Amino acid sequence: MYREGNYLICAYNDVMSLKKEVKHNCLINIVPTLYKSGLEWDDVMPTIADACVRSANKLDEAAAKLIQKTSGDKELNEAVIQFVDYVKINCTGNVGYS
C-alpha cells in the first residue's frame, strides 16, 4: 500500500502540476522524463494513465489483504479500514483539489 500510494500521489501531482512547471521552466516531472526516455509524446499520458490504473489495482489488492488479515480483531480491523480510506483519500487528493 505504501509503494502504490506514493506512486499514485506522485504521478497525479506530476500530471496536475505540469502546466505550472512548464511555465517556470522547472521540469522535474514524470511527463518529460518518459518523453526523454524515448516514449512518443502521444503515448506519454496513456502510459501514465495505465500505470495509475495498475497501481490503484495493486493498492486495492493490498488493502483487501490487510483488511482480511485483521478481520478477527474488530477494533484493529476498523482502524485498518480507516487507514485504507485515508490512503485512498491522499492518493486522490491532488485530483480533487485541482
Image (tube, helix red, strand yellow):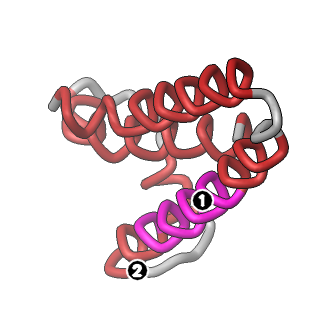
Query: Which span of residues is magenta-colored?
Result: 48-61
Residue 5: give x, y in percent of width and height.
60, 39
Q: Residue at x 32, y 80 (%)?
A: 42
For the C terminus, the quadrant is top left
Q: Residue at x 38, y 28 (%)?
A: 26
Count of residue discs:
2
In-image side of 66 versus 88 (left or right): right
Q: Amino acid at mark 1?
A: Ser
User: Is 48 in front, or is 30?
Assistant: 48
Specify the principal SS of the magenta part: helix
Instruction: Point out the tag, 2 or 1, that comes first from the N-terminus.
Output: 2
Magenta span has 49?
yes
Q: Which quadrant would residue 96 be assigned to in this image? A: top left
- Residue 43 is tagged as 2
Q: Is residue 32 above or below residue 75?
A: below
For the N terminus, the quadrant is top right
Q: Which quadrant would residue 58 be assigned to in this image? A: bottom right
Residue 60: give x, y in percent of width and height.
59, 56
User: Is 9 in front, or is 88?
Assistant: 88
